[in-house]
């Protein structure tokens, strides 16, 4: 069941989303060659605590760190590690979810580490565009699939890329993951009618190859492309309003 948030809840979720956005801006400055993903994690955790909030991933279903750091062919849910040192040419998704006064905000971006290849740059650009095109189409009364899967899949496949299918966006705000499941590919299963007061994420994971399949690592979290292709992701939390939408993590 998809919950319609009350004005009071929306107010609280907005504040958490604004903090998640601020934290992601802070994260951007930490992304330099030579830094470990564990250092990024520690600094971000500290930053969030100073704002009287907590990082939702920490201990979520046993996740051991405060953020997800997904490098190169890692699609998502990468675990920060002190032995993992960023190097020039890498791409890294940093995914931030905050809990502020009990409300959740969720956002992520894929950053370049120093100078990256033209192919990697193109993947970042197309993935960011895919998210933006989808967001711009949101309107109450429309089907979720018409605003997300039907926009993102045809757009990215034009470039020879693929949309990860096993993972998707989600309702968010009162809990980390709520209904609806947000499919980023075209499917009739995505039949939620958008209504004012709905809050969910759109977070396409796009592989730089036609193969959308993933493999799960033995750590129980890290998810990679099966063929080693690069994968990028951008995520926003959005609110459906009476006339359209509001991006809460902007
Ligand atoms: N923030 C991720 C999302 O966008 C979820 C991470 S779950 C975790 O849904 F446990 F890995 F943190
Ligand atoms: Co996220
Ligand atoms: Co999310």
Image: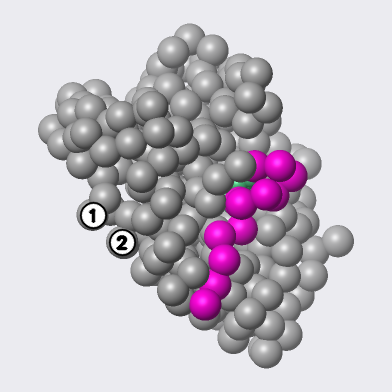
Mark 2 highlights which residue? 26
Q: Is residue 119 left or right of residue 235?
A: left
Q: Residue at x 75, y 58 (%)?
A: 178
Residue 244 versus residue 31 in the image, above or below: below
Q: Nearer the viewer, residue 249 or 122?
A: 249
Mark 1 highlights which residue? 29
Q: Is residue 126 left or right of residue 212?
A: left
Mark 2 vs mark 1, CA separation in Å: 6 Å
Mark 1 secondary-structure assignment:
loop
Inspect the magenta stretch and tell me whether residue 192 lies in it. Answer: no
Q: Residues within 10 Å of mark 2 (few under 14, many from 20)?
A: some
Q: Residues within 10 Å of mark 1 (few under 14, many from 20)?
A: few
Q: Which image quadrant: the N terminus? A: bottom right
Residue 184, percent across and down?
59, 41
Residue 51, percent across and down?
46, 76
Query: Which residues are drawn in magenta?
Result: 52-63
The count of marks equals 2
Q: Is residue 234 left or right of residue 32?
A: right
Find the residue positioned furthest to the bottom: 8
Q: Which image quadrant: the C terminus? A: bottom left
Q: Do tag 2 and tag 1 residues touch (Cβ < 8 Å)?
A: yes
Residue 92 versus residue 27 in the image, above or below: above
The answer to whether residue 151 is visible is no
Q: Residue at x 49, y 69 (%)?
A: 49
């Amino acid at each position: 069941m998809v919950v319609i948030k009350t004005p009071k809840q929306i107010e609280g979720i907005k504040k958490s989303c604004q903090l998640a956005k601020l934290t992601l801006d802070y994260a951007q400055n930490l992304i330099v060659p030579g830094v470990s993903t564990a250092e990024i994690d520690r600094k971000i955790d500290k930053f969030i605590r100073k704002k009287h909030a907590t990082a939702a991933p920490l201990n979520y279903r046993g996740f051991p760190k405060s953020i997800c750091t997904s490098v190169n062919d890692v699609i998502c849910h990468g675990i920060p590690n002190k032995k993992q040192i960023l190097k020039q040419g890498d791409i890294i998704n940093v995914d931030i979810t905050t809990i502020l006064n009990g409300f959740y905000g969720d956002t992520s971006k894929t950053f370049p580490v120093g100078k990256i290849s033209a192919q990697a740059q193109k993947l970042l650009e197309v993935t960011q565009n895919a998210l933006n095109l989808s967001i711009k189409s949101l309107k109450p009364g429309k089907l979720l699939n018409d605003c997300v899967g039907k926009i993102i899949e045809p757009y990215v496949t034009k470039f020879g890329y693929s949309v990860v299918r096993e993972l998707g966006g989600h309702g968010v705000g009162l809990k980390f993951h709520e209904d609806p499941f947000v499919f980023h590919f075209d499917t009739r299963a995505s039949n939620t009618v958008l209504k004012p007061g709905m809050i969910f994420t759109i977070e396409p994971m796009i592989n730089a190859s036609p193969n959308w399949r993933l493999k799960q690592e033995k750590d129980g979290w890290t998810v990679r492309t099966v063929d080693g292709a690069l994968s990028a992701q951008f995520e926003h939390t959005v609110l459906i309003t009476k006339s359209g939408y509001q991006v809460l993590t902007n």
